[in-house]
Amino acid sequence: MKRHSPILAASACLLLAVAPGQARRVMENLGRGVIAVRTSSTSVYIGWRMLAVDPTNVGYNLYRSEGGATPVKLNSSPLTTTTDYVDNTAHLTAANAYTVRAVINGVEQPASAPFTLAANAPIQQYLDVPLQIPPGGTANWCPGGAASSYTYSANDGSIADLDGDGQYEFVIKWDPSNSKDNSQSGCTGPTILDAYKLDGTRLWRINLGKNIRSGAHYTQFMVYDLDGDGKAELVVKTADGTVDGKGVVIGSASANYTNSSGYILTGPEYLTVFDGATGGALATTNYVPPRGDVCSWGDCYGNRVDRFLAGVAYLDGTNPSVVMCRGYYTRTVLAAWDWRGGKLTQRWVFDSEDPNHPAYKAYEDQGDHALTVADVNGDGKDEIVYGSAVINNDGTGLFSTGWGHGDALHVSRFDPNNPDLLVYTIHEGGKPWGRTLYNARTGALVAGVDPNLDKDPNRGMIAPLDPNYHGAYFWAGGSAGLFNLAGTRVTSSEPTSTNFGVWWDADLLRELEDGTSVTKFNVSNGATSTLLSCSSCASNNGTKAVPVLLGDIFGDWREEVVWRTSDNLHLRIYTTTIPANNRMYTMLQDPEYRLALVWQNVAYNQPPWPSFYLGPGMSAVPQPSLSYPVNLSGSITAKTGSTGARSWTIQVNNTGTAPANAAEIQGIGFVQTSGTACTPTVTSPAFPISLGNIAAGGSASSNIVINFNSCSGSPQFTVNIPLSAMQSAAMTLFTATGQTE
């Protein structure tokens, strides 16, 4: 009999609490996200997702198919404490496919998509995704400027289901070696965006062209399903000469608007929606706002005019919109767009220099090199936290604190005793504060430290670090200690890392990610221990030293970290292999956290945070109110034939907004509720039964032939029929009661 490690069974699971009265957000269909990695010569670590649709008493059965054989259940009773498992009995010279089935009220649900650990898999705790490096070149198109050769490195990344198969793909930005900060002159090579499946298959390549300058502040790419069709779109700023994933040029292919210093201060600017599956351009419009008078943004040489931010937000509480932004040192403009029914329409524009709203001038010089999307007032609709100011879901100004611009931004419920989200940010000017913690709903100061700081803190971090303190500590570069939520210094030392946080080990404290390492800080003695390090990997964006992506990508609720290899030939998706001692639903279904993975690639990348407090002393995790693009239901529409060959017609309906690709009837189960005991048997067809693709609003049917010869009289049954699509990213259990032959 296969057993969990004793550690796995040591503590009770974390409960889910439903948040009532909120709109149901349309979010992607997610499967179980099964992951398996070999941890020793004899053991395999397996993790999977607890989904927001799972009840609090859900259990799971884990199955293993060795070399294509019939799957064998590994656990003797449903797993209820964690969503991971250590398999110590697999024959690792063969390929082993792992699947998970939820058990709800004693009934098994549809099987997850399998994860196959290859025969003789190496001992490693990462997945390897092959990349295709774009060819380098020479940027010699800046009139009167020096030519500059370049090669490419894999840079920021994003995840989404691009092709509707229920699995995540990666979108990777390729950064040329001569990319520039806005403050630096020089001709740059073009920025390139690639899409990859996890096996390394490249779906498309988009070349933004010479009229989009390369650097951290120029290209913010939003990847998300904006119209509920089950496939994500890509939205990004484009220009004349951008080549889409089908090889089609946007605008003029010959236009060149670069100047001798490498800046692009003239020429049209566009916003383009690209098809996630093909990379083809779907719609292009003028970028809002246009640059206009370059000097009006704070300088005349081209630095501050091209400071861009972006995010995806549920501004109406139900459907996602994309928000594209320009400026934060002086003029600040945010433009919200909807992609619906194949049309790109503008929802609203916030402009700090709107003559109809002179009070909006207070929002200038308040933006950070990042933004966060969060529902700050609990109405189910998202606001934009723009550093030291917040823009309401309707495009009006909610408040501006006036504390100024900074380089780091974190938003979450850092205090379990405060129902509101808090914002931690740092300020370059340091007047009146070098660092602030403020209430995201009201703008009220919670804590301010380093008054009139006459230096730039550069980076700042906040995290639950102390098992004996219910809440987070915050710190910054050179802060000489950790500060509690009241702004009181509690230690004389602080972590050397002020970069990313990552939930990695088995406790509720957050570990730290910096460069290519994951470390743990011990508050009691100031020591730092290394939990993970990759000597053959590289970080991104210079001294920022950030990963390609960090977040809860698959497996249980804990986070993965994605680095590129130093030779840029691979992505490595590292996952923890430390057995868990609790469970909660995947953070991908927490609205704030999921959207954080969308905006993480923006400017100075920031770590993702959930909308709830996650740390020592946490309460029940609030369960989000979601709906899904693919929504399956079933019915029994006909029963014909003899007792020994009774044919039941099962109709499967898709009431969602996206096609249910690769829909299946996975099986049928009979629970007898009356009459003399008997055992109906299915004689044909074999399960699973393929129904093909079911269009949105459509249906498909199949006949199941059942032998009732063992039954006499008129026994009744409850019939359970698991339905699935998109490799079980969409699934439901159709139950029909009171059924007779």
Image (cartoon, rainbow, N blue to C red):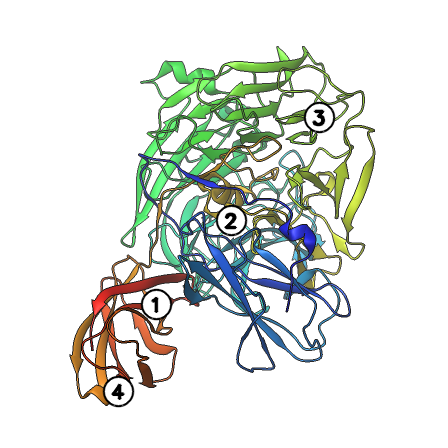
In the shown orientation, is residue 340 left or right of residue 740? right
Residue at (56% x, 15% y) in the render: 446
153 or 696: nearer the viewer: 696
Tally of numbered discs: 4
Q: Which mark is on residue 476?
A: 3
Position of residue 465 relative to residue 649, above or below, is above
Whole-number angstrom distance, CA of label 1 to CA of label 2: 22 Å
Q: Secondary structure at mark 3?
A: strand
Disc with the residue nearer the chain's start (4 vs 1): 4
Residue where numbered disc 2 is placed: 586
Residue type for callout 2:
Thr
Whole-number angstrom distance, CA of label 2 to CA of label 4: 46 Å
CA neighbours of label 2 inside 10 A, class few (<14), some (14 to 19), many (20+): many
Residue type for callout 3:
Ala
Residue type for callout 4:
Asn
Q: Secondary structure at mark 4?
A: loop
Residue type for callout 1:
Leu
CA neighbours of label 4 inside 10 A, class few (<14), some (14 to 19), many (20+): some
Disc with the residue nearer the chain's start (2 vs 4): 2
Disc with the residue nearer the chain's start (3 vs 2): 3
Whole-number angstrom distance, CA of label 3 to CA of label 4: 75 Å
**Residue 545: x and y, percent?**
72, 42
Residue where numbered disc 1 is placed: 723
**Residue 581: x and y, percent?**
63, 47
Residue at (70% x, 67% y) in the render: 88
Q: Which mark is on residue 709?
A: 4
Disc with the residue nearer the chain's start (1 vs 2): 2
Q: Secondary structure at mark 1?
A: strand
Are the two marked residues, 1 and 2, in contact with CB atoms closer than 8 angstroms? Answer: no
